[in-house]
Image (spheres, grey):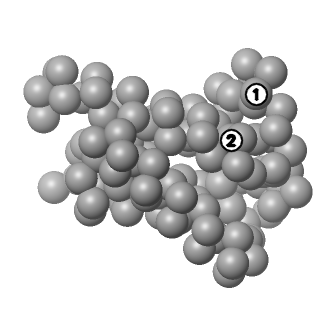
Amino acid sequence: MTKSLFTFTLGIGYLVIALFASLAETSSAAPQEYPQEYSQNYLQDCKATAMTEGLPDIEAETLCKCTLREFQQKYTLDEFKDLNKRSETDTTASDALIEVGEFCFEEILFEE
């Protein structure tokens, strides 16, 4: 992948993660599955946003599934919702969401 494509896709990741930071409202550190309806809505909205920003279908789906999985491993649903809400004004909260996005973009970029 070229550097300009990497920069473009990383920028998309920031936008997608920022969007979902505002859509959700955070939870605690025990791995768990969020309610099915919440997860389906997250994946649907995430994928639509990622594709609108230029990410191909397969990569958008991979990114969104990865971010959901990582958020579920790190945060309870309530923590995740809270983190997303705080990310609008708190750079530490925003950075926590971006970190997950970066991790998942690396998964997409370096998969074989």
Taking the image as shown, residue 8 lies to the left or right of residue 37, namely left
Taking the image as shown, residue 54 lies to the left or right of residue 104, namely left
> Is residue 40 shown to the viewer in this render?
yes
Q: Residue 6's spot in the image, x, y percent? A: 24, 29
Q: Residue 89's spot in the image, x, y percent? A: 80, 21
Q: Residues within 10 Å of mark 1 (few under 14, many from 20)?
A: some
Front-most of residues 97 and 29: 97
Instruction: Please report contact status of discs 2 and 1: CB closer than 8 Å, yes or no.
Output: yes
Q: Quadrant of the N terminus?
A: top left
Taking 29 as reference, is 109 above or below it?
Answer: above
Taking 99 as reference, is 3 above or below it?
Answer: above
Query: Callout 2: helix, strand or loop?
Result: helix
User: How far apart are labels 2 and 1 at the CA level?
Assistant: 8 Å
Numbered marks: total: 2
* Residue, disc 2: 21
Query: Callout 1: helix, strand or loop?
Result: loop
Taking the image as shown, residue 2 lies to the left or right of residue 50, namely left
